[in-house]
Amino acid sequence: MGIADDLMQGLGISDPVIRLGVTGLSRAGKTVFITSLVANLLDRGRMAALRAAADGSLKAAWLQPQPDDTVPRFDYERHLAAMTGPDPHWPEGTRHVSQLRLSLRIQPRGLIAGWRGQQVLHLDIVDYPGEWLLDLRLMEKDFDQWSQEVLDRMAGRPGAGDFRAALAATDPARFDETAAQALAAAYTSHLHLAREAGWSDCTPGRFLMPGELDGSPALTFTPLPQEMRATPLGREFARRFGAYKARVVKPFFRDHFARIDRQVVLMDVLGAIHAGPPAVEDMRRAMADILTAFRPGRAGWLAQLLGSRRVGRILFAATKADHLHHIQHPRLTAITAAMLREARDRADFSGARTEAMSIAALRTTTEEMIREAGEELPAVRGTLMDGRQAAFYPGELPANPAELLVPASQGATRWLDGDYAIMDFAPAPGTLRPGDGPPHIRLDRAAEFLIGDRL
């Protein structure tokens, strides 16, 4: 929706629109979340906690052509077939910005219900590659600051040694494109390895998902130590860093990110806990930095008329709650809320409503108790990626989030009092009943928080 559409909506000429941004880092489940949310809004049998679905005021939902002709459509049908077909599997992850419009027909409640007819609300869901979000905080940094921060936190991450070796072998006294490409390749390899090992803060994000920019000068630079920054190599890398911000990051922020009304931030908290204290602290810091790029709060009528939005509601969702027995879900939610305390306080203070929640957009497991060493343990059972069935107890999360977050913030390299495991489950085979969307955990509560006030 462009400025003209914003103006029409502000004047009351067109149907109201909510732009819902779905963001998060790699493997947090953005594609699954959007697919299951749309399917469960189309067939609302599992959406009891969405008040408009429960009381019948949400009369109908249907997909429409998206309003932005230059933005790829989110491939809902293909993703749903992957998740719920005869051979269920996880759909491909997000690799570019995409969008989907879901239109909702609503009967107003209360005193006005008798004389006011049904209304249509358009829900524009925008999917962002999580890796690109990390770049938004680069807008406030120069090349020297970014380089120093990246190099300071690089120690101990996979691939860091190879990149530093490539730096040491490079002559910065002259700029050579071949040498620059070799350095960029080594740094990109480090970023991929770090992401696979569970690290969240891997910038620039487009190095991980370059798309049409692959091989361009805008993606051919690396952080440099202080002694190399005043050299021909350093000056050129600084110039390219500036071009990356101006021509890649800023247009993304202006054209997509800054126009969001409601926001979902998906987090694979369990994956970070399994990776260890450094990954937990890295996720906490990365998410706090990302959220500085949001403009949370309530926009006035003039700002809305001019097309400038502010995020009114932000949901922080710890995904893959189905990997835990339900008795541990409150602990996962508490850990998520504690990880994001600083960022949430900032958003709450500026007027946005925020919520932390543990969800599973597609439930893949059932619950059972298993006996191990003479003890009954709350476990989950599901289909592994190789097709085998397994019951799994991941370990007990602490009741006090500080037992995880304090060691992480203090630089601990491993957990002293617990060993937290994870298992990769495949989508469970099954047949959806007429009127039901895919099985989930608290997706209806997430929808109620995000859009329930407008239904």
Image (cartoon, helix red, strand yellow):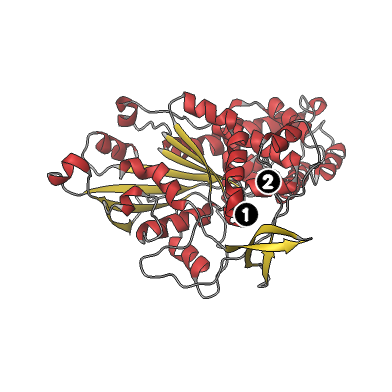
Give coordinates of residue 268: x percent, y percent: 62, 48
* Helix, strand or loop for disc 1: loop
Q: Nearer the viewer, residue 288 or 237?
A: 288
**Position of the C terminus by quadrant:** top left
Query: 93 above or below 346?
Result: below
Q: Nearer the viewer, residue 164 or 416?
A: 416
In this rendering, would 383 be left or right of 252? right
**Position of the N terminus by quadrant:** top left
Name the residue rendered at 42%, 28% in the picture: 297
Name the residue rendered at 17%, 40% in the picture: 111
Whether the residues at callouts 1 and 2 have beta carbons within 8 Å, the answer is yes
**Which image quadrant is residue 325 in?**
bottom right
Name the residue rendered at 65%, 59% in the picture: 379
Query: 136 above or below 205?
Result: above
Q: Residue tagged by mark 1?
A: 324
In this rendering, would 27 be left or right of 165? left
Whether residue 198 is visible, yes or no, is no
Task: Return the disc, 1 or 2, that comes first in the chain's sequence.
Answer: 1
Q: Amino acid at mark 1?
A: Leu
> Alpha-carbon distance for marks 1 and 2?
10 Å
Classify mark 2: residues with Cα within 10 Å, few (<14), some (14-19) or many (20+): many
* Helix, strand or loop for disc 2: loop
Give coordinates of residue 263: x percent, y percent: 46, 40
Give coordinates of residue 388: x percent, y percent: 68, 72
Q: Nearer the viewer, residue 231 or 342?
A: 342
Q: Amino acid at mark 2?
A: Leu
Q: Residue tagged by mark 2?
A: 397
Classify mark 1: residues with Cα within 10 Å, few (<14), some (14-19) or many (20+): many
Whether residue 34 is visible, yes or no, is yes
